Image (cartoon, grey):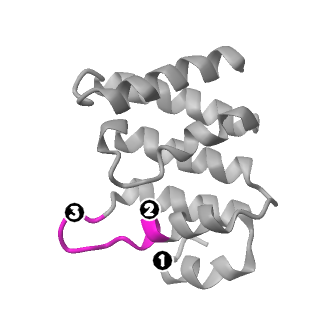
Amino acid sequence: LKDIFTYVDKATEAMLAGSGAEYRETDHIRLSYLIEALGRTRYEPATSMLKKYVPKREFKLGIITRASAIWALGELFDGKDNPSLRSELWDRMNDMSPIMPEDYLVRFSCALALGEMGYEDSVPTLKQYDDGMT
């Protein structure tokens, strides 16, 4: 896990420092799987790195990797209170602005993460986006 984290952290910093164009779709898919492994195993040292994927302004990080990182945060914060993270996830999930709304996959991952966190105050927000699958 430490090697996976080191690899993903290095790629994250490189994407943030670059234009984002140097990473192909296949690179983002590979990173997505590695990020999900960090979440699935609840590798806590990855928390601060994963939080870099939440803000919408980080387009360089890619949609699929952002969605995976947000899902992984839900796994890491299962049963742990983090009001600022919940607020950020609510903002991302509710961003349906007419100009450049948040990507659907990112919004869906926010709903999954909020559901995983299991806080009662998230229920009204989650119900607002219930598409009949629950």
Quarter-wise, where is residue 2 in the image?
top right
Asked whether disc 1 touches disc 2, contact meaning CB atoms under 8 Å apart, the reply is: yes
Instruction: Indicate the position of residue 26 as horizontal and vertical percent values.
Output: 35, 23
- Per the rendering, the mark at residue 129 is 1
| Residue neighbourhood size for the residue with mark 3, other residues' Cα within 10 Å, grouped as few (<14), some (14–19), many (≥20) | few
Helix or strand or loop: what does disc 1 sit on? loop
Mark drawn on residue 100: 3
Residue to which mark 2 is pinned: 107
Of circles 3 and 1, the one toward us is 3
Q: Nearer the viewer, mark 1 or mark 2?
A: 2
Tag of residue 45:
none
Q: What residue type is labelled 1?
A: Tyr
Magenta stretch: give its range.
Answer: 91-101
Q: Magenta region, mostly helix, strand or loop?
A: loop
Distance Cα–Cα, label 1 vs label 2: 10 Å
| Residue drawn where x is 44% and y is 62% of the image | 107
Seen from the viewer's position, the closer of residues 101 and 86 is: 86
State the SS at label 3: loop
Residue 5 relative to residue 42: left or right: left
As for residue 98 lying within the magenta part, the answer is yes
